[in-house]
Amino acid sequence: MMFNMSAIRFVFLFSLIAGLLTGTCDSSFGQVPDAPLELTAQASFPGDLSISLFWIDNSLNETGFEVQRRRDGDVDFITIGVTPFSNVNSFNDVGLEENTTYVYRVLAFNADGASDFSNTASAATSFARPLQVSNLAGEIIDGSVSLTWTDEANNETLFEVERAEVGVSTEYSVIAVLPPDSTSYVDSTQLDGALYSYRVRPWRFDVFGGAPLTVELTTGSPTQSPRSVAARAKSRSSIEISWSGRFADTALVHIQRFDLNTGLWADAGFVKAKSRKFVDTGLLASTFYGYRIRIETPTAVSLWESTSATTKRR
């Protein structure tokens, strides 16, 4: 059996002396411990390359536990840890290889010998997490957003470039998927007049890099804002927002309502700018509502214009 007898004898003598001094030495000494029961193995979060083991301590006289491991497909187990303490029921195996299945078993020991092995348990690691990019930077070149970064990983399988409009959405959308070793990207799909946040995420198959860096850029010049923006209560449950101006057929008005519960703006609707009004329904009676609207064309957005109103009591 593959356990460390020197460590076992030391722990046993230490425990025995302590028991004699305190009067807690019990009659179970002089026999080997019972084997641990119900060993389980659980892989860590993707990318962390560790496996946690748990078992039931089935004996009263052990002075420690020995943990053994082998790769799935191998024959021989190796000792990866000796815990020189009683009443232990877990072990964390770290620094493992990616995408590998490991098989484990555990025994309990004291100075009289070792127990039988527990049942075997297995778990598989994920792929290794790639290092996040560094030095992410962006600038406007010829009307497009040019992003550059330093690739710090040597194991990525792809990069995702993501974008969110600051103050409009908290969720990033993937705008490009790039091959390994990429260090730049040009975004020509942005709308002029918007403030965007960009981030780049390296992936190794289904595992992405750590917390990504972000860079914010304001793009181009905004289009013309709506004029004479106003809001008025139509009923106990509806408010009408109106505006004026000259608009192209393709122009839309984006209406957002302020959510007092979250402290964020939420979409209330989109309508043709030429309609010059929008009715927000399903509201609470006698309640204040704040709004903001802007023009959106296929190539640009305007600045936001704010207004507010309170629904009728009855």
Image (tube, helix red, strand yellow):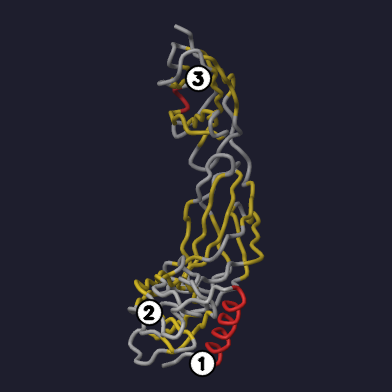
Q: Label 1 amino acid?
A: Met
- On residue 34, the disc is 2
Label 2: element kind: loop
Position in image of residue 231 (x %, y %) = 53, 17
Position in image of residue 12 (x %, y %) = 54, 84
Asked if marks 1 and 3 touch (Cβ < 8 Å), the reply is no
In the figure, residue 304 lies in which quadrant? top right
Q: Mark 1 points at which residue?
A: 5
Q: Mark 3 points at which residue?
A: 241
Residue visible at 50% across and 80% down? Answer: 63
Q: Can residue 239 be seen in this view?
A: yes
Label 3: element kind: strand
Image quadrant where one finds the N terminus? bottom left
Q: Label 2 amino acid?
A: Asp
Q: Earlier in the sequence, mark 1 or mark 2?
A: 1
Q: Can residue 102 be seen in this view?
A: no
- Above or below for 168 versus 94: above
State left or right for residue 97 relative to residue 133.
left
Image quadrant where one finds the C terminus? top left
Q: Which of marks 2 and 3 is nearer the N terminus?
A: 2
Mark 3 closeness class: few <14, some 14–19, many ≥20 residues within 10 Å: many
Label 1: element kind: helix
Q: Label 3 amino acid?
A: Ile
Separation (CA) of disc 1 from disc 3: 82 Å
